[in-house]
Amino acid sequence: MQVSTEKKEGLKHVITITVPAADVKNFYQQALRKVAKSARIDGFRKGHVPTNVLEQRFMYDIIEQTHDAIFKETLYKAVTESKLKVVNTPELALVDNNFSADKDFVYTATVEVEPEFALKPVADLKLKHFKSELADADVEKMVENLREQQGKWQAKDDLAISAETLANIAFTLSVDGKEVENGGSDNFNVQPGKTSLIEGFSDQLLGHKAGDKFVIKATFPTPYHNEELAGKEGTFDVTVNSVSERILPEVDADFVRIYGIKDGNIDAFRDALRKNMQRELNKALYARTSESLFDALCQQYNDLEVPETMVNAEVERLKENMKKNIQAQFGFTPKDDMLKSENFKDQAVNNTRLGFILRALEAELKIGEPSEELVNTLINQYAEAFENAEEVVKSIRKDKKAMANFFGQAYEHHVVEAVMDKACDGETVLSFEELTSRK
């Protein structure tokens, strides 16, 4: 067998494999014997059909099985001999479609290979190490947020509409002097500054009270989901049905029971809340640090070419993740035009690029296996978010795929830590809110 390689555009190479005629003959004879064992032809006993009859009736099957046997026997050896670091399933093509068992069999395998590149100094990244501490004020603010979530709206006479109130209104809409069909409502809730409406509508509600009747004029944006209204001025005849204020619950035994503190102990509630917030803070710190590092690495190697087949596979993975997220959050399956491949291309390139960079850094920095302690920490941190944490931990440890996932997370933590030790150039202190509320 002869093997030659030719570099093509980008990371593509073509491997040409030539199988000698003598070997082709052997593969052909093996295929012929295999077909002969199962061939059934009237007038002949099974396994005793003459070769010329077999070739006449089953030549296509014989040649196909010969091809398959040759590929199976020679492709892996050829790729190994080429010394190319192949990343995809080779695309095979025959050089000559006219098969003969008496001549050399020549075919090509088009492959993509890993990029070869020199590592750049990590210290040049000059990244900031993010730090944060959970303050008592952060915990108290979270308590207030939880109170807000459990608050109840209560209508109040003579209360003026403000950014802190909820207004229930009735209105009709007219455009160009004509009332818009289905353009109004008898029971519409508006919370100024929070309810998504056309610009200027909510502001004109401010100061009005229940029973007030008035006209609001506001211009629909361009573009607008209703094309007939886009860019036009709308006239809204408004009646305020009611104005409500939000009544917040006291932080008492009944309140904390809502959040899983069955005995109603307020101190236990605050302790649990602090613990949850600390866990969230730790995750946010790592996420911000790793994101900063990964973005910097992608920028540092922004000219690194990566295999197209790997990018395409990553595009499909990102699309599938987006599809599942939309289904989980909104309850519907997105249409194909919402998941266009080009929308994921840049991220897929960066993700693929980052994979090669991190593997090279792992080797350069001689990063070993992640510690069992770190793997256990990550598993426990995940499980703590569930009421039955111990059962969750047991379930994870029985699941090989789940354990592999946590092992991978731990490995990434080690890589980030090792690289940041060399790339760090000072620190940036952030508050809990700055870390956790960033979009």
Image (tube, rainbow, N blue to C red):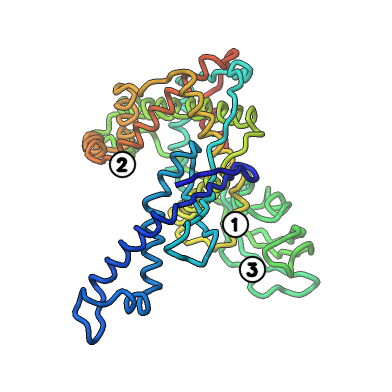
Q: Nearer the viewer, residue 399 or 195?
A: 399
Question: Alpha-carbon distance for marks 2 and 3?
Answer: 53 Å
Asked whether, in this view, residue 125 is left or right of residue 262, the answer is right
The mark found on residue 340 in the picture is 1
Where is residue 199 shown, x and y percent of the image?
A: 72, 52
For residue 11, which quarter of the picture? top right
Q: Nearer the viewer, residue 48 or 287?
A: 48
Q: Nearer the viewer, residue 370 or 232?
A: 370
Q: Residues within 10 Å of mark 2 (few under 14, many from 20)?
A: few
Asked whether, in this view, residue 286 is left or right of residue 160, the answer is left
| Residue 179 visible to an observer of this rendering | yes
Extreme residue toward the bottom, this view: 43
| The C terminus, quarter of image | top right
Q: Which residue is mark 2?
A: 401
Q: Nearer the viewer, residue 257 or 52?
A: 52
Q: Which residue is mark 3?
A: 184
**Residue flagged by tag 2: what amino acid is it?**
Lys
For residue 291, which quarter of the picture? top right
